[in-house]
Amino acid sequence: MKKRKSGARILYAFSGPLQEDLERYQLLAEFLRERGWELLGLSEGWELQLRRLLEAGAVDAVVAEPMSSLWLESLPHVPPWVGTREAEGGRFWVDVDWADLGRRAARHLREQGYQRLALWEPQRMPRLAEAFGGMRIRNRAGLQLLLEEDDSPLGICCVSDFQARQLLRLAKELALVVPEQLGLVGVGNQEWQSLLAGRSLSSFPVPARDWARSVAQLLEEALDGAPARGLLVQVQSLRLRESSRRKQEGLLPQFLGWLEEDVADPPAMEELARRAGRSRRSFEQQIKTESGLSPYAHLIALRMQQARRLLRESDWPQRRIGEEIGIPDPARFSAFFKKHQGLPPGRWRKQG
């Protein structure tokens, strides 16, 4: 089928947790509309519906979990395809940087005093398991066996907040005290999972906007016939909560997490101070005491970090990058970047 770059129709297959899928779908649709493309979402039975759409010439590309080569060969033709998790064999894909997440989760759990670490891994995730020395738990029996071997504090990383909630329920059945005996870290930062669990869950947010931006970029490359490649999305800073807080920490990790949620338009300092239960002056002094930097200096650093990443990894114009970090005026963005980087953004991008 002839690829139509203008007015392309993209199929998105819902296959993960509904709330996460909906957020990703909406953000991806936003990025594709900017290109003049249409996004069609399908859920149960999408495989059969895809066949019919391909036969009718109504789909130009697909965003879905990677499928087997045998299944793909059974299609009328194989459209450009971006997988929603890591894939092999010369395919496009976008996935969480599980290796980096594992290292950060393991470091956090050690800092909280957990002497043993493990990964709650019902499915096989080798990149994530590396950070835990291959120590994996897949079911209740495995957890009980690990607890019988040693009674020292155990820290566990789960691949989702849903699994962290399930493990919290299992801990209650086994009369384990959380977080003193068992610490849990999840992925997704889904508040409603904490509400259902009855205890707030420490969790790594996955930036859905970065994921959608990466998928849109690879779709464009796939439709252009570029060589296949994968992109990794890094999670944001851990949101530290009850499930893994064995030691009382300062305000800095929480403050940075709040800023990362919306670098372009962060909450006012008074609001952040209120969340921390402090006056604005006390809050600002505490951040500076812990880090040596003012809250505003941290915001500048995060905006510069995001601007450099977008200049390096995307072909976005400077105006759009400025909008993404909260400086929509191109002249102001250029002056801001040069002041803190030493070079104008255009020259820095060329040299990078």
Image (cartoon, grey):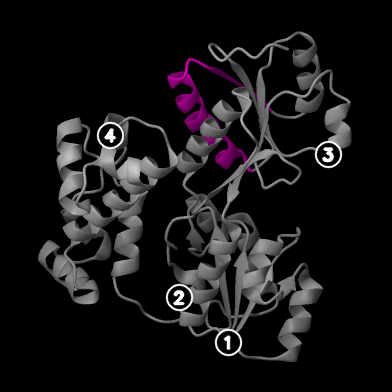
Q: Which mark is residue 323?
A: 4
Residue that carries the numbered disc 1 in the rendered image: 115
Asked if the stretch drawn in magenta spans residue 29, the answer is yes
In this rendering, would 54 be left or right of 215? right
Going from N to C along the chain, the mark reached first, 4 or 1, is 1
Instruction: Tell me the quarter of the image containing the N terminus.
Output: top right
Q: Residue at x 55, y 77 (%)?
A: 178
Q: Which mark is residue 245?
A: 2
* Residue 199 percent location from the top left of the image: 51, 65
Q: Residue at x 65, y 59 (%)?
A: 163
**Label 3 amino acid?**
Ser
Mark 1 or mark 2, whichever is nearer to me: 1
**Label 2 amino acid?**
Arg
Residue that carries the numbered disc 3 in the rendered image: 68
Determine contact: label 4, label 2, CB under 8 Å: no
Helix, strand or loop at label 1? It is loop
* Corner quadrant of residue 92: top right
Going from N to C along the chain, the mark reached first, 4 or 3, is 3
| Measured Cα–Cα span from mark 3 to mark 2 | 42 Å
| Viewer-side residue, 274 vs 47 | 47
Going from N to C along the chain, the mark reached first, 4 or 2, is 2
Going from N to C along the chain, the mark reached first, 1 or 2, is 1
Asked if the stretch drawn in magenta spans residue 86, the answer is no
| Viewer-side residue, 197 vs 283 | 283
**What segment carries the magenta color?**
17-42
Going from N to C along the chain, the mark reached first, 1 or 3, is 3
